[in-house]
Each structure stands twice: as C-alpha cells, then as structure tokens.
C-alpha cells in the first residue's frame, strides 16, 4: 500500500517523505505507506490464502530489510490486518516495530464471518500482537451483511473513548456506506478518518463511483491499496517475465488489464 511520494535530494543521500493527517483525526502519517499483508508466519490453510500466497513464500530477512529501508526513507506508516495470516502479519510487525516511533494501521475482523460484537475481543488480540497499548488507525476491513455499520461504529467509538484507538477508518466502503459510518461516528463527536480502497492507474473506479468525491466532501482521507497494481505498473513484467506467487494467474498479469498496461507504463517512461 502506498499513497504518495518519497524523493531524494539529487545527491542520493537524503530521502524525505511528505506527511499528511488522516482526515480530521490527529494522526499524522507519511504519505507513502507500507502494506505488510504477506509478512509473518502462517500456518495450516493460512499458507495458501491469497493474502499470503499472492507474492510467494515467507521471507523474514526481506521483511526486516523492507522495514529498515522504510524508516530510513522516513516512511513511518504501516498497514496490516487481523486477518492477514490470522494475526501472523500483526505479530511480525509488532516484533519489528517494538520501541519504534511508527504509525500502525490494522483492521477488524479476524475472519470473514466476524460480527460487530467481536470487536472488543479482536481489538485486544491485535493490541497484544502489535505489542501496543493503542492502535493509531483501526479500520473495518470490508462491508459485510453480517456487520451492521452503525453498531460497529458505536463499538469503535467506545474503543476511542477507552484510549485503545486513535482514529477510526473503513476499507472497501462505497460512498453510501461511508456516509452511514461517518454519521454514526459524528453522533459521538468522532471523525471518520479514512477509507482504504483499491486505487491505481489501472483501477480508477474511486474517481467515478462517488468514493473520492465523498471523501473530499466529508474530509476523509482516501488510502490507496495496490497503488502499483501489485507491481504490474512498475513495467518490469511487460517483456514476458512473470511475478512470483499466485498473483501471476490474475489480472493485471493476464487478461485485458495486462494489455492495458503497456501504454500506461510507456507514458511514465516518457515523463521521466
Ligand atoms: N484493504 C484491503 O482490502 C486490501 C487489499 C489488498 C491489499 N491491501 C493492502 O495493500 C498493501 C499493498 O498491496 P500490494 O502489495 O498488492 O500493492 P502494490 O504496492 O501495488 O504492489 C507491491 C509490489 O510492487 C512492486 N514494487 C513495489 N515497490 C517497488 C520498487 N521500488 N521497484 C520495483 N517494484 C516495486 C513489488 O513487486 P514484486 O514483488 O513483483 O517485486 C511489490 O511486491 C497490502 O500489503 C495491504 O496492506 C489492502
């Protein structure tokens, strides 16, 4: 997950990440963030879940190197979820981030079957996994008919008041669902800070489905996930090379989106 830019001073020695505040919350983050969906140990079925197998196998040394490179570039915003490797991603991030001044976002619920009333217990497990007394941004991972948004936002507000969450976010919410969450939180005097959605040059639906406009209207930060279209937009797979993991079997590494890649990536090259 990345949301902006980092740049060097030209001498190659300094990298500065711009920062921004999440919505009308008090949580300040680097505009560029690091998603750690595939970090950590997975066991049993978790090893073959798309969130784990999309990019190939475990790589503890790579995780540590990515964490250190992010801090060196002043990228301090890390995104995980209770569901990623059933807490394995949170545990690995918690281990690497212990004692470090970083901003951590995670997500509820633990499984797709989770209900709103599971929030307090799931939140406690996430705090333990992350080795923290509070979570900077706690997001509802995706809307579900099993979870009433207003009820969930009431429980989120309780956790804010208890000091366990600093800001409340949602993910994969439509414009209408964002309004429901926003209004439920507003009754408790708490802003809805963010909506994390798929957004890249290959996937621009937030510009036309009302999500981006609603974010602007209500002062909510749009957090882009898969901003590089899972690596496809880097251009390194245009000449026949195939990425590792099961993502190679899905768009945009095959099908119409693969064919849409070349003109987009070529435009980048011209701009440089
Ligand atoms: N909320 C949700 O429902 C949801 C859903 C999906 C993802 N997410 C979040 O979004 C995060 C990111 O997703 P993603 O990893 O698919 O997105 P992405 O940022 O679009 O793609 C990451 C891939 O881009 C390539 N890449 C990144 N930086 C590069 C560089 N400097 N040079 C060359 N290649 C580079 C790498 O590909 P190679 O591996 O090929 O080298 C890397 O694996 C996840 O970890 C998760 O936190 C959230």
Image (spheres, helix red, strand yellow):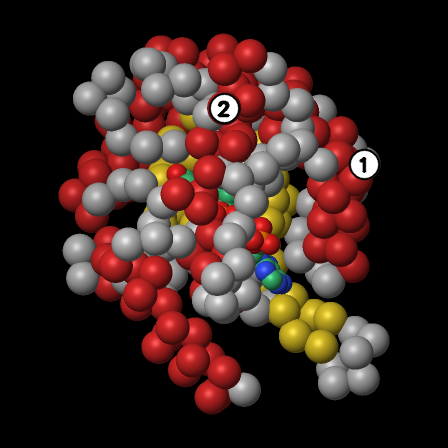
Q: Is mark 1 within 8 Å of ligand 1?
A: no
- Mark 1, residue position: 99
Question: Is 266 situated above or below 101?
Answer: below
Residue 7 falls in image quadrant: bottom right
Q: Quadrant of residue 214?
A: bottom left
Separation (CA) of disc 2 from disc 1: 32 Å
User: Could you tell me which residue is drawn at 78 percent across and 48 percent down?
Assistant: 65
Q: Nearer the viewer, mark 2 or mark 1?
A: 2
Left or right of residue 68, residue 88 in this image: left
Q: What secondary structure is marked by label 2?
A: helix
Q: Which residue is mark 2?
A: 48
Picture mark count: 2
* Residue 184 badge: none
| SS state under label 1 | loop
Visible in this render: residue 45? yes
In the foreground, 261 or 221 = 261
């Amino acid at each position: 997950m990345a949301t902006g830019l980092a740049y060097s001073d030209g001498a190659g020695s300094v990298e500065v990440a711009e920062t921004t505040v999440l919505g009308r919350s008090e949580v300040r983050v680097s505009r560029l963030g690091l998603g750690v969906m595939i970090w950590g140990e997975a066991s049993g079925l978790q090893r073959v879940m798309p969130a784990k197998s999309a990019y190939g196998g475990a790589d503890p040394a790579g995780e540590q190197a990515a964490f250190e490179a992010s801090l060196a570039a002043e990228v301090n915003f890390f995104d995980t979820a209770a569901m990623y490797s059933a807490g394995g991603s949170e545990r690995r991030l918690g281990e690497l981030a212990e004692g470090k001044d970083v901003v951590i976002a995670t997500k509820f619920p633990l499984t797709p079957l989770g209900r709103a009333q599971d929030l307090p217990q799931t939140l406690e497990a996430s705090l333990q996994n992350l080795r923290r007394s509070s979570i900077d941004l706690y997001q509802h991972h995706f809307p579900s008919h099993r979870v009433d948004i207003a009820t969930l936002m009431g429980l989120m507000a309780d956790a804010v008041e208890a000091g366990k969450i600093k800001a409340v976010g949602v993910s994969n919410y439509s414009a209408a669902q964002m309004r429901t969450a926003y209004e439920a939180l507003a009754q408790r005097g708490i802003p809805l800070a963010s909506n994390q959605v798929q957004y890249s040059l290959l996937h621009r639906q937030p510009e036309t489905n009302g999500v981006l406009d609603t974010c602007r209207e209500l002062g909510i930060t749009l957090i882009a996930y898969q901003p590089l279209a899972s690596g496809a937009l880097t251009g390194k797979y245009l000449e026949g090379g195939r990425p590792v993991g099961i993502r190679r079997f899905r768009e945009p590494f095959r099908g119409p989106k693969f064919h849409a890649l070349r003109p987009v990536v070529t435009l980048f090259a011209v701009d440089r």
